[in-house]
Amino acid sequence: MSDGQALRVLVVDDEAPARNRLRDLLGDCALKLPLEIVGEAENGRRALDLLQERKADVVLLDIRMPEIDGIEVAQHLQKLEHPPAVIFTTAYDAYALKAFEVHAIDYLLKPIRVARLLDALSRARAMAPLGADVLNEIRRDGRSHLSVNERGRIHLIPLAEVLFLKAELKYVTVRTAEREFLLEESLAKLEQEFLGRFVRIHRNCLVAKDAIRGFERGAVVDADGEGEGGWAVVLNHVNEKLPVSRRQQHIVREFGRIL
Amino acid sequence: MSINQNANAGALPNFRNLGIVLRILVIVDGICLAAALLETSEPLPLMEALVEMSAQAQPILLLSLLLLAAFNDLLHRLSYRSAIVALVAIEFAVATAMFFLGHHLFNAAGTLERYWLFTLLTTGVLVGYFELRGRALSPALTEARLQALQARIRPHFLFNSINAVLSLMRQDPRRAEQVIEDLAEMFRVLMADNRQLAPFSQEIALAKQYLNIEQLRLGERLQVEWDIEGFPDDALVPPLVLQPLLENAVYHGIEPRVEAGVITIQLRCERDRVRVVLRNPYRPENDHHTGNHMALANIRERLALHFDAEASIKTSAAKGSYEVHIVMPYITGRA
């Protein structure tokens, strides 16, 4: 990102008229500020895909979009090596706007005025990157996907596919029916974010409630020797069994699915 | 039939409305029970007292209800004061007639004065009740109108629509004109005095204008199926019932989806009933925006104001779809 180059802009909005309007306005801005539209995306997933192929300096990101909303897209974007600056756009969202004010995050209200857009774009290069914590705070509910950066590509894991999360040294292992992913987040924060979806069966392990087939006695012993003679979770879709720590034994009774 | 009849203070209720009739029955029987309780609280004598009381009160009550339903239109043409006088006169006549009839046929106990007193007191209680109820509900109407602008049109819709029109200005000015015309007409209806019942054709026109605008924003994602074959144009309904529900359907059903979704609108007229069914796809896990139930509560309240117990609105969610089911009486402008 050097000042001499044209500003590379990506437009993300699920409504075609809104994208057209932004294209017109960016055309107007181009007369005063060298810029280039590197792409348009109609949803969050498409935006993340586009950003793997081409670099952007700024993303104009609509908040209310189906499946993965704008704030979540911004969260996943932060996993890129050089995350672009994000300018949120919205027609109306009282809750998010308040949060943006509090955290001094730039946003544009639709209908957008060309002067405001120009102003935001000229400041974009100098903008501080969005903090993951701040974005987490703005969201009212958990993300719909987890994301990991694998060899420079962002991989989205739908939350519904996650069977369990296991903390291991620096990472959290995310297990789906197909494979494992390594996530650089803290288990405690994940537990908070997805309250109700997972149940803690062990100091280092959260299991998706939907993934629990039942409980079995014995068989599994973990590194600390815990779980000996105790209960283990039997999962749907995979053969792994996970030990339930002594402190969490009560969940066996709560679920009541003893095999 | 206008809403002023049963909502404004100082007007008699509509005696042909099932809800009103039920209220009267419950209150009069309540009075009887209270009177019986004054005499005794032992179970057996209480039953006897109640039966005796009912034998005297029920004939008066039922005959009164029949007469009032028959004279309903006539009573409503009078001023409130004269209507009350007429009402009291009717009640005295009924009480007197029943007294002599009871004496002749069954040798019933009690004096004429007692019959009169009972009738007068009960009539007074009921008139007072309905007047209070009218007073309590009429500010709700003004309130409902104020809410109309807030709850009806989400700011979200307004600003997104203006944005969509702006996007058309350069490429397709003609279409932009059309959309602004639709918007203007929508707001004219929204800001009108919406206390009177309006023909259903107006509701359908408003709904179509609204859906046109949403179509512009959402394109292929929004698909609408109308099933209104043979529905009578002259059916009268409280205004702004369809559009806010469609707005909910778009907001919670279509916008959270990446793929296309269908909204179905079904209008049926079955003899004296109008049935409205709205269906939209719905997956709670997709809908991050837990809506306020303002629109639904608002419509429920207005249906109750107009039709009391004769209208109902129910919602159900199952198998990925959400349904709103409204039943109301079929009323036309022709008296």
Image (spheres, coloured by chain):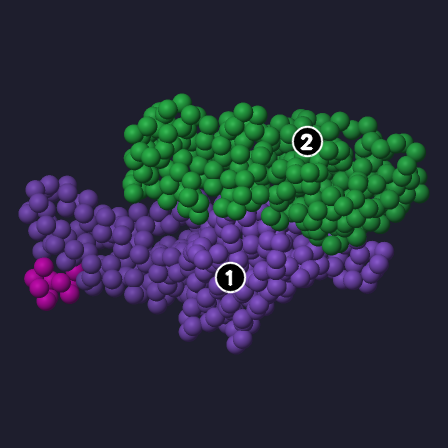
Of residues B29 and B112, the one drawn nearer to the viewer in this rendering = B29
Q: Residues within 10 Å of mark 2 (few under 14, many from 20)?
A: some
Question: Is the residue B223 above or below the residue B297 in the image?
Answer: below
Report the magenta stretch's main SS.
Answer: helix
- Magenta-span inclusion, residue A144: no
> Could you tell me how far apart the alpha carbons at marks 1 and 2 are, in whole angstroms?
37 Å
Q: Which chain is purple?
A: B
Label of residue B278 in the image: 1
Badge 1, how many Cα within 10 Å: few under 14, some, many 20+? many
Residue A72, position as x, y percentages in the image: 63, 39
In the image, residue B271 sits, relative to residue B166, either above or below, namely below
Question: Where, by quadrant of the figure, is residue B311 drawn?
Answer: bottom left
- Residue A10, image x and y in percent? 78, 44
Which residues, given as a range, are shown in magenta? Answer: B99-108
Q: Which residue is drawn at the image coordinates 44% and 45% (left, top)?
A: A238
**Label placed on residue A100:** 2
Q: Is residue B213 above or below residue A214?
A: below
Q: Residue at x 51, y 67 (%)?
A: B266
Q: Secondary structure at mark 2?
A: helix
- The answer to which image quadrant residue A78 occupies is top right
Label 2 resides on the chain identified as A
Q: Nearer the viewer, residue B139 or A114?
A: A114
Q: Reply yes or no: does residue B100 show up in magenta.
A: yes
**Left/right of residue B168 with respect to residue A42 in the rendered view:** right
Looking at numbered disc 2 in the image, what kind of residue is underneath it? Phe
Report x, y in % for residue B323: 47, 58
In the image, what residue occupies the spot 49% across and 35% down?
A165
Q: Is label 1 or label 2 in front?
A: 2
What is the chain identity of the residue bearing mark 1?
B
For chain A, the rendered hue is green
